[in-house]
Image (cartoon, rainbow, N blue to C red):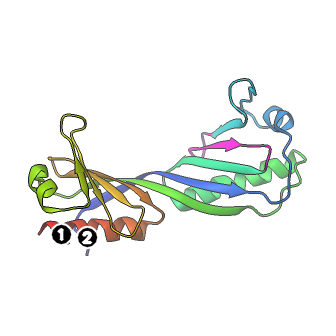
Amino acid sequence: MVDAEYKVNNVVLTVSYKDVELDLEKISSNLEGARYDFERFPGVIYKTNKLKACFLIFSSGKVNCVGARSVEGAKKAIEELTGKLQKSGCDVGEPKIEVQNMVASVNFQRRFELEEIARNFPNVEYEPEVFPGLVFRMEGTSVAFLLFVQGTGVCVGAKSEEEIEEGIDKIREALE
């Protein structure tokens, strides 16, 4: 039962093209808008405006996809990238795709007493002199929430929307 509102702001995926060595010079010259400067960064930086995703492409066949606002949107962007790589002569097969992180903004629709939460829960970090938010870690997962007095938060470390929703429910239950 999620009574808070959330919005996914960023999805980070890793993509692996198996047994392939990518020619980054060739890729950067064939992908419109791609940048490659080996002296500054060892991969091609490619952004698609249409699907709002950015790729970091490495010669090893590994690719990071960031900036999409949904897993479906990221997968669509990866599918488009795969097609463009194949058209440019790269012998890439089906990519192996794995969600690494989802970042979501959350409105819990209530205010938080961060000092009280910090005193009552062992799995939190709160140092208002350093950062105005409280870090609330979900036990047994990589999910954490940054909670702010106004009742807003940021969820990081989730690999699915279900994990975001479960974390919101756990926070709501813990703080009731």
- Judge left or right: residue 84 versus residue 173: right
| SS at circle 2 | helix
| SS at circle 1 | helix
- Mark 2 is on which residue type? Lys
What percent of the width, then of the height, locates residue 83?
A: 78, 53
Quarter of the image with the C terminus in it: bottom left
Residue depicted at x 19% and y 34%: 129
Q: What stretch is highlighted in magenta?
A: 48-60
Q: Mark 1 points at which residue?
A: 174
Quarter of the image with the N terminus in it: bottom left
- Picture layout, residue 17 above or below residue 3: above
- Judge left or right: residue 12 versus residue 38: left
What percent of the width, then of the height, locates residue 29?
A: 82, 32
> Mark 2 Cα within 10 Å, few/some/many (few <14, many 20+)?
some
What percent of the width, then of the height, locates residue 82?
A: 76, 54
Which of the 4 image quadrants contains residue 57?
Answer: top right
Residue depicted at x 21% and y 42%: 127
Q: Do the residues labelled 1 and 2 touch (CB within 8 Å)?
A: yes
- Mark drawn on residue 170: 2
- The residue at the far bottom in this view is 1
Residue depicted at x 72% and y 36%: 44
- Judge left or right: residue 162 versus residue 150: right
Residue depicted at x 12% and y 61%: 120
- Picture layout, residue 95 above or below residue 27: below
Is residue 150 found inside the magenta-colored segment of the image? no
> Mark 1 Cα within 10 Å, few/some/many (few <14, many 20+)?
few
What percent of the width, then of the height, locates residue 146?
A: 28, 50
- Picture layout, residue 118 above or below residue 67: below
User: CA separation, marks 1 and 2?
Assistant: 6 Å
| Residue 81 or residue 147, whichever sits in front | 147
